[in-house]
Image: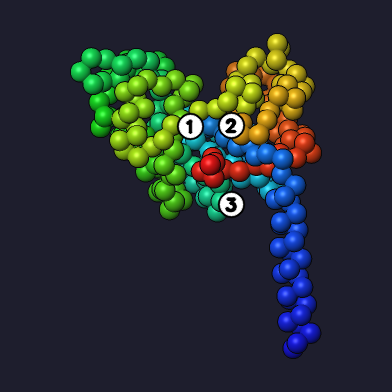
Amino acid sequence: MRRAVRLLLGSWLCSLTLAAGAQSACKGTVYLTIDTGSMSHAELIAETLNKHQVKATFFLANEKTVKGFDSLNDFWTQYWRERAAEGHAFGSHTFDHGYFRRDIKGGLVSYEVPGKPARLLDARGVCDELNRAKTAFRTMTGREFDPIWRAPGGRTTPNALKFAKQCGYQHVGWTESGFLGDELPSDTYPNDTLLKRALASIRDGDILMMHTGIWSRKEPFAPMLDPLIAGLKARGLCFAKITERK
């Protein structure tokens, strides 16, 4: 019995030592954020994150996907349940993935979904748009969003930011060097160019941004996530969720 206790204690201390060593080895921290898109490489991204034991921050909107079901459709329930169980962070990307174009007199903001007439939203309208995504996610996973959001395209207005903050959402953008470029045309921005640029420019504190898939890009960027994470870790950078940012 005593020998078993000693072995258990030794194993526990070893784990603590390894964890402390890994933490002390960090020369900085970066924050990987992933917006919904076509979901064409959603599974590959999940596999890569698990392989490297990296926690990311997902921003969810109800977007059209290659599977024929929108990204917040019940079809994706298992996918989001698994990501929630893995301990990632989640925020709103609006429900309809529209763009906040400009503020309008009278306390309104113009919200434009491609292919549809612009909608003028007041504070309640903005909150409803953010919360619709949260409600869908909660129905699928039983988990709430973290109090964060990202405007599609990163386009915000003073009213949009103010209204979102009033209903509990803090906006999260990305840093210039954290823009991974997966939405750029691959003929002029091939994967090897984007990867080299990211590995050379990303620094401590950067917020990285990519998508689960981009319709227009011929050479998908998602396979580069594996060497990107490995390369940044080799430089001593650790990964954390945006909710852990100080």
Q: Is residue 232 left or right of residue 165?
A: right
Q: Position of residue 213 (x, y in %)?
A: 60, 28
Looking at the rendered image, the disc whose residue lies closer to the viewer, 1 or 3, is: 1
Gap in Å between the C-alphas at discs 3 and 2? 20 Å
- Residue type, mark 1 in image: Val
Q: Is residue 85 left or right of residue 218?
A: left
Secondary structure beneath dot 3 equals: helix
Q: Position of residue 128 (x, y in %)?
A: 30, 34
- The answer to whether mark 2 and mark 1 are in CB contact below 8 A is yes
- Residue type, mark 2 in image: Ile
Q: Is residue 196 left or right of residue 218?
A: right
Query: Which residue is under mark 2?
Result: 207
- Residue occupying the point 31% across, 16% down: 103
Q: Is residue 170 above or below residue 151?
A: below
- The answer to whether mark 1 and mark 3 are in CB contact below 8 A is no
- The residue lying furthest to the left in this view is 106
Q: Quadrant of residue 187?
A: top right
Secondary structure beneath dot 2 equals: strand
Lower position in the chain sequence, tag 1 or tag 3: 3
The answer to whether any part of residue 209 appears in the image is yes
Lower position in the chain sequence, tag 2 or tag 1: 1
Q: Position of residue 53 (x, y in %)?
A: 68, 48
Q: Is residue 18 above or below residue 9?
A: above
The answer to which of 69 and 52 lies nearer the viewer is: 52
Label 3 crowd bin: few (<14), some (14–19), many (20+), radius 10 Å: some
Q: Is residue 70 above or below residue 117?
A: below
- The residue lying furthest to the top in this view is 188
Query: Which residue is under mark 1?
Result: 172
Which label number is shown at residue 86? 3
- Residue occupying the point 70% across, 15% down: 189
